[in-house]
Image (tube, rainbow, N blue to C red):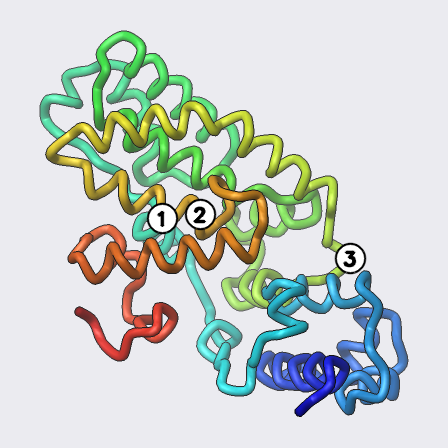
Amino acid sequence: MATQSERIGRNIRDLRKHFRETQKKLGEVLAFAPNTVSDWERGRMQPDISTLEKIAYRYRCSVEQLISGDFSEADFTSLHNASVSWEDMASLFESMFPIVCSEKALQDPHFKIGYDETVGKNFALDTQKRAMKAYKQSLKESGTVESAANLLCVIYMRYTLFQNEQQQKKIDAFLKSEMSGKDFMDGFVLRDPKALDKELEKRKQDYAREMDELIFDCLQLLKDSPTYNRLADYYLALGYSIGLVGTGQQTANETIGKELLLSCIRLGNSYAIEYAGSNWEVFGMDEEP
């Protein structure tokens, strides 16, 4: 049976190779010599917890997964090779965070303001704030259920897009066409551990606590609606998956979120199916239900 050091080393090696990075480059990023990376991968040495956090951050996994997971069959090639446009990003977010509308909702002036700010716009913070303000006013004055749905869309998007200053500059450059899609993806798929910002994580947690009551109020409105009750199920599952709602423990949240999303998919939830796309294997499924 492999020791913990050997298991961690194997995972570091597999992740590094899947992301097509050399030992030299990983060592440079982490400020270690290439032979140190080699020793880790051979199980001769084990990185300390601070270094494990940086490696996990770079390769987009949790420390728990790095210690006890198995990445031998993982394949991130499609992400690594991706070259995206603004339209690609907008399409991705629309599948994750559905925007809803109805003729009746459009008669609500506050809903229409929020809707106009949400549809076809970029992810700028000021745009999100204007949309949130309008949707909140719509709920307060008219109780428009579509405002509850789109308010969740904005809250979830805001949480997902929390960035430090360095990352925000990359987003702004991409939105202004000052950075190519491939450079943008390289900067977000293979992350720089120097950007690991515990203060940023604290801000995200504070935001999640601040939004908690509003999120569940919106979820309740959707759950009570025959039209949007499945959207409530989807957003609850997604909230656990991304850590916006739940236990406060990343691994537990991911497990609960995955199981809830899988249940939604098996029950024919169109929102969860749209989110999962063609990556059914992520949810332990061989093909679309």
**Which label lies toward us, 3 or 1?**
1
Q: Residue furthest front?
A: 1
Residue drawn at the location 44% of the way across and 52% of the way down: 241
Residue 274 versus residue 247 in the image, above or below: below
- Number of numbered tags placed on the structure image: 3
Badge 2 element: helix
Q: Residue furthest top?
A: 141
Rendered location of residue 91, percent (x, y): 33, 54
The answer to whether residue 90 is left or right of residue 244 is left
Which numbered tag is attached to residue 240? 2
Disc 3 residue type (three-letter)? Lys
Label 1 crowd (10 A; few <14 / some 14-19 / many >=20) = many
Rendered location of residue 81, percent (x, y): 49, 77
Label 3 – label 2 distance at C-alpha:
27 Å
Label 3 – label 1 distance at C-alpha:
31 Å
Label 2 – label 1 distance at C-alpha:
5 Å
Badge 1 element: helix
* Upstream in sequence: badge 3 or badge 1: 3
**Residue at image mark 1:** 237
**Residue at image mark 3:** 194
Rendered location of residue 283, percent (x, y): 35, 68
Residue 230 versus residue 187 in the image, above or below: above
- Quadrant location of the N terminus? bottom right
Residue 255 versus residue 199 in the image, above or below: below
